[in-house]
């Protein structure tokens, strides 16, 4: 308990030192001009103003965040809903494996960003193009981790199920999927990271709102404060999302840690 | 399940000239050779033999986890072709489901069989109490010691009420002290809840302490070298003259096999 508080204090101190260092090299020592690197105070001011102002990019910050969240969550959830059952089916039924594997292995090495041009051509620069790009990126870890997770099932556990007369479906749901669950969660975390990171990349290239778009507009008009503020917002929102996933993992993955 | 228990004089497990060869042609490896074995109801049979001799394979053949290449295993008069709920199994290690609590593990078989929750909870609780794990129902296996994990494994096998419980060196990975303790526990559990048990071990003291009958196997390929009916009164003492005498007898028999 006491060490836990101590570690929390250390983490807090690290953030504080970072901010202090940043403040010193900008406002105090003025090593970098504020149009290159604005001070934390400036960025905070910019954040507060941007909460309610829609200039220079046409939307307020909450609207950008919401737009980005909508895209990334839609893609992430679709990827999870499609990818996890697909990975499980591939690992459990070899016919599905043989059917899907060649295409999957072919598409797997293509980075999500590599999909952007074709998606723009096919779907334009709206919501669906971004969802499609991020979906492709997030799908891969969902499939691979579910697949590997199921393959990791302990043969002794299968025997136990069999000696209790379990049917193949029972074995899948009562033995294989619980075995795979921690690995699936790792896949979900990777997918979440990808969907949030790819989102920004997609918005930089093909969008008319969202956090990535906001940063892109700020760059063209030389507003470094918006750029840095946007980056920090992306970081914080990403952190919040992965914390939610950690919470779910702790809740649903049982008996792993003593 | 009740009517299968009525075969009072008949054998629960019958091995009829069973053999097992792994692989084919020149790479083949004969592990079990022409074993005949009849196990009566409520008999505690220990299969004892040198390491790597094929004891576990013999047990897996009874369990249906492996298929015989010759002969037939019958349980309750029916040939064994696949694992089934009338044959419970206790494994060497890692056989508990880490994502389930003690209760979840013990009631697992009943859950698969579709037994109602209240009924299976009650049953599982009885066997959890029997193996001495009262108060640990909600613990996960990571928090339990090796000996406690094996207690859960035993309760899990008992809970499904199988005709025969197959135990594959269940204490092989425990330290000596825990092992003695668990042997006493098995003795206590089996005297409270009589069951047909086939117990594989390579520990001679364990064999004599627990067995109604010891089947001594030869080196690989395993065949029945000799049988010993152990009729010492229970609970047995590891240092009684009769115990030591039998131990001496079996040891000399094993030495003859040129280990």
Image: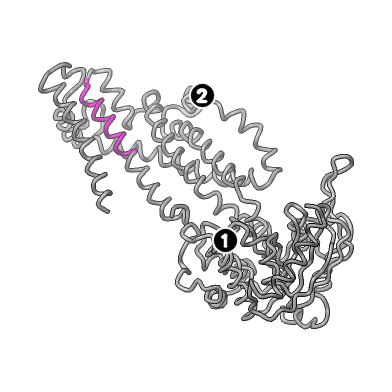
For label 1, the SS is helix
Please state which of residues B143 and A19 is positioned toward the viewer in this rendering. Answer: B143
Q: Image check: A137 left or right of A162?
A: left
Q: Position of residue B229 (x, y in %)?
A: 78, 74
The answer to which quarter of the image holds residue A243 is: top left
**Residue that numbered label 2 is attached to:** A118
Circles 1 and 2 in contact, beta carbons < 8 Å: no
A5 lies above or below B160: above
Please state which of residues B248 and B100 is positioned toward the viewer in this rendering. Answer: B248
A257 lies above or below B106: above
For label 2, the SS is helix
B89 lies above or below A248: below
Instruction: Report the magenta stretch's main SS.
Output: helix
**Residue that numbered label 1 is attached to:** B176
Q: Image check: A250 left or right of B10?
A: left
The answer to which quarter of the image holds residue A105 is: top right
Which residue: 84% across, 62% down? B225
Q: Position of residue A10 (x, y in %)?
A: 23, 40
Which residue: 89% across, 41% down? B25
Which residue: 58% across, 67% down? B180
Please give the range of residues in magenta.
Answer: A223-238
């Amino acid at each position: 308990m006491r060490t836990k508080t101590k570690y929390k204090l250390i983490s807090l101190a690290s953030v504080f030192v970072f901010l202090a260092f940043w403040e010193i090299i900008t406002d105090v020592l003025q090593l970098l001009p504020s149009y290159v690197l604005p001070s934390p105070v400036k960025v905070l001011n910019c954040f507060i103003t941007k909460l309610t102002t829609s200039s220079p990019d046409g939307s307020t910050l909450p609207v950008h965040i919401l737009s980005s969240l909508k895209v990334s969550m839609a893609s992430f959830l679709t990827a999870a809903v499609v990818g996890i059952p697909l990975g499980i089916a591939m690992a459990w039924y070899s016919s599905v494996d043989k059917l899907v594997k060649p295409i999957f292995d072919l598409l797997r090495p293509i980075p999500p960003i590599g999909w952007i041009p074709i998606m723009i051509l096919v779907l334009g620069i709206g919501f669906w193009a971004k969802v499609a790009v991020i979906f492709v990126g997030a799908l891969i870890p969902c499939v691979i981790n579910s697949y590997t997770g199921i393959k990791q099932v302990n043969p002794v556990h299968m025997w136990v199920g069999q000696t209790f007369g379990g049917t193949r479906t029972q074995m899948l749901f009562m033995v294989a999927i619980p075995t795979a669950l921690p690995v699936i969660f790792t896949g979900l975390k990777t997918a979440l990271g990808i969907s949030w990171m790819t989102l920004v990349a997609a918005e930089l290239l093909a969008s008319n709102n969202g956090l990535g778009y906001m940063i892109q507009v700020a760059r063209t008009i030389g507003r470094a404060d918006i750029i840095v503020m946007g980056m920090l917002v992306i970081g914080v929102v990403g952190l919040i999302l992965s914390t939610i996933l950690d919470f779910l993992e702790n809740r649903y993955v049982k008996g792993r840690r003593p | 399940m009740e009517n299968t228990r009525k075969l009072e004089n008949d054998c629960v497990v019958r091995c009829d000239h069973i053999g097992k060869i792994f692989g084919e042609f020149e790479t083949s490896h004969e592990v079990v050779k022409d074993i005949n074995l009849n196990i009566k109801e409520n008999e505690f049979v220990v299969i004892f033999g040198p390491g790597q001799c094929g004891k576990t394979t013999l047990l897996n053949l009874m369990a249906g986890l492996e298929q015989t290449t010759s002969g037939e295993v019958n349980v309750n008069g029916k040939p064994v072709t696949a694992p089934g709920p009338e044959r419970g199994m206790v494994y060497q290690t890692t056989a508990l489901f880490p994502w389930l609590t003690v209760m979840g593990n013990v009631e697992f078989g009943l859950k698969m069989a579709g037994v109602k929750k209240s009924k299976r909870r009650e049953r599982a609780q009885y066997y959890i109490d029997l193996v001495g794990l009262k108060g640990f129902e909600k613990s996960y296996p990571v928090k339990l010691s090796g000996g406690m994990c094996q207690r859960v494994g035993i309760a899990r096998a008992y809970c499904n009420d199988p005709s025969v419980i197959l135990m594959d060196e269940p204490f092989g990975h425990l330290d000596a002290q825990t092992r003695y303790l668990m042997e006493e526990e098995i003795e206590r559990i089996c005297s409270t809840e009589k069951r047909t048990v086939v117990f594989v071990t390579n520990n001679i003291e364990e064999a004599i302490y627990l067995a109604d009958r010891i089947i001594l196997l030869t080196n690989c390929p395993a065949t029945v070298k000799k049988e010993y009916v152990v009729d010492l009164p229970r609970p047995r003492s590891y240092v009684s003259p009769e115990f030591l005498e039998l131990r001496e007898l079996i040891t000399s028999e094993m030495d003859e096999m040129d280990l």
